[in-house]
Amino acid sequence: MRRVMAMLTALMLVICMAGCGSKDDNTFVVGMECNYAPFNWTQTEDSDTAVEIADGSGYADGYDVRIAQMIADGLGKELVIEKIEWDGLSMAVQSDKIDAIIAGMSPTEERKATIDFTDAYYESELVIVVRADSPYANAASLADFAGARITGQLNTFHYTVIDQIPDADIQMAMADFPTMIVSLQSGNIDGYVSELPGAISAASANSDLTYVQFALDRALRVIRQTAPWQWV
């Protein structure tokens, strides 16, 4: 089994390299999926820490929302949350629709060609979410997932590490985590790759799900990445 490198999570604040700015100088506009608990989610009711989503579809809350609020407060601006599908986030910040992305985005070389990143503000690890009654729930190594139907979110590094699982039956990537959860519960897949906090959240909200962690020498490997950035 290949040696695991320490994981630097994909939870990054992203800024357009050209120098973004919302049309209203009094606002700080942040894009996120609002679909990635516990980091960001959508709820129907307001709360002390929630922020109304700009399109009126509900309220956003979670770790990323709290970080966004701290930045907005530090800038003396009003926080505006734009709910945007994952694939549209990079284009939104490049086209000046939003000022920043705070949504769990890794600083890959391809992304760094068009958008800039802060230093990481959260570190995590990769796990595999499975059904609690699945034979894979007792897996002790990646080799135990041989033949398992595994997937990850589309256009994320989660999906790119699946080929480290020997003889895994790699499924098509899916659009978001709620879709993967439904697919797992319905038996269409055997598991999906997630960061640990997301897996804990999924298992807490769905008693039929659990997740598998691995010892360092048996875990999914990701490349250590840093992304120095200075607010301007």
Image (spheres, helix red, strand yellow):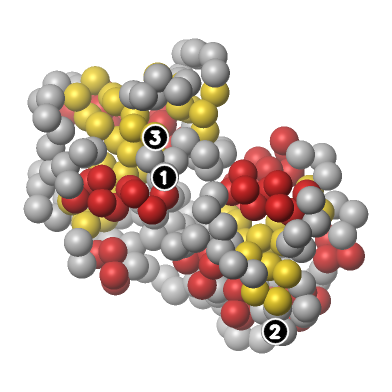
Q: Secondary structure at mark 3?
A: strand
Q: Which residue carries the number 1 mark?
A: 85
Coordinates of residue 21 in the picture (x, y in percent): 12, 37
Q: Residues within 10 Å of mark 3 (few under 14, many from 20)?
A: many
Residue 6 visible (yes or no): no
Q: Quadrant of the C terminus?
A: top left
Q: Give yes or no for contact between labels 1 and 3 (Cβ–Cβ under 8 Å).
A: no
Q: Secondary structure at mark 1?
A: loop
For this view, does 17 lie left or right of residue 141?
left
Q: Amino acid at mark 3?
A: Lys
The tag on residue 166 is 2
Question: Real-space Cα distance between discs 1 and 2?
Answer: 31 Å
Coordinates of residue 61 in the picture (x, y in percent): 48, 27
Question: Real-space Cα distance between discs 3 and 2?
Answer: 37 Å
Residue occupying the point 56% across, 38% down: 38
Q: Residues within 10 Å of mark 1 (few under 14, many from 20)?
A: some
**Precedes in sequence: disc 1 or disc 2:** 1
Residue occupying the point 14% across, 21% down: 26
Q: Amino acid at mark 1?
A: Glu
Looking at the picture, tell me which residue is in the foreground, 126 or 41: 41
Looking at the picture, tell me which residue is in the foreground, 229 or 163: 163
Q: Is residue 185 above or below residue 127?
A: above
Q: Nearer the viewer, mark 1 or mark 2?
A: 1
The tag on residue 63 is none
Q: Which residue carries the number 3 mark?
A: 83
Displayed quadrant of residue 151: bottom right
Question: Real-space Cα distance between discs 1 and 3?
Answer: 7 Å
**Precedes in sequence: disc 3 or disc 2:** 3
Q: Secondary structure at mark 2?
A: loop
Coordinates of residue 104 in the picture (x, y in percent): 43, 50
Q: Is residue 45 above or below residue 193?
A: above
